[in-house]
Amino acid sequence: MPMPPVQQPPKEDIACRICTIRLEQVCYQRAWWFRAFREVLATGIRLFAIAYRIRPDNYKSRSKMCFKCLRFRKNALKRRSRLFNWLDGYLNPIFNRARDSLLTPRELEYARALARRAEDRDFVERESGASLRPSAPSAGGPHEA
């Protein structure tokens, strides 16, 4: 008698307020130390995710740009782990201050707009490089030509 198929949990949606991936690209270019600083924290998230059996495949990727972003695992950990929440409450403000010190207000706003645009599953960010600046000012958010 064949075994019934194992049912996968439904994929969860995760809402983002800022595109951390893009901001980190800029920070990597501006400060030699930022990659090491971020990777230590990202490794912690990955280890917690393994311990709590959180897989990136269980989350809907908002767009191709967002595929396997750490945000999915971090938000899932916030819902499941008191220890992670405690550590995140202490470390995340330090990380944000370090990251934001390397960025301009315009770059931060662009990353917020980019996160809103990424809600469209067919969205592909076409701007190359790490400037995060739209090529022409527009009221509708980032330029995607």
Image: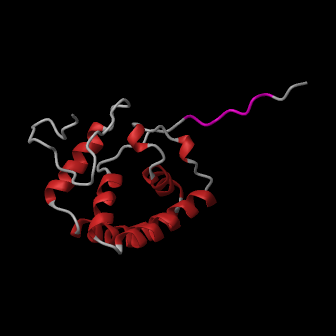
Q: Main secondary structure of the magenta part?
A: loop
Instruction: Please report the residue visible at 10 percent of the width from the left and 38 percent of the height from the top.
Output: 138
Q: Is residue 97 left or right of residue 44?
A: left
Q: Nearer the viewer, residue 62 or 133?
A: 133
The residue sitting at the top extreme is: 1
Q: Residue furthest bottom?
A: 33
> Would you say residue 79 is visible in this rendering?
yes
Q: Which span is picked out in magenta?
A: 4-10
In the figure, residue 136 lies in which quadrant?
A: top left
Query: Residue 57: percent from the left, percent from the top?
Result: 56, 42
Q: Quadrant of the N terminus?
A: top right
Residue depicted at x 32% and y 58%: 25
- Whether residue 8 is in magenta: the answer is yes
**By what rule are the colours in the image chosen?**
secondary structure
**Picture mark count:** 0
For the point 79% across and 28% down, which residue is it? 4
What residue is drawn where x is 20% and y is 49%?
110
Q: Quadrant of residue 117?
A: top left
As drawn, the residue found furthest toward the right would be: 1
> Where does the image place residue 6, in percent across and percent down from the top left?
73, 33
| Front-lying residue, 144 or 43 | 144
Vertical arrangement, residue 140 with respect to residue 85, above or below:
above
Give x and y (percent) for residue 77.
50, 56
Q: Indicate whether residue 140 is drawn in magenta.
A: no
Percent x, y of residue 17: 29, 48
Whether residue 86 is visible, yes or no, is no
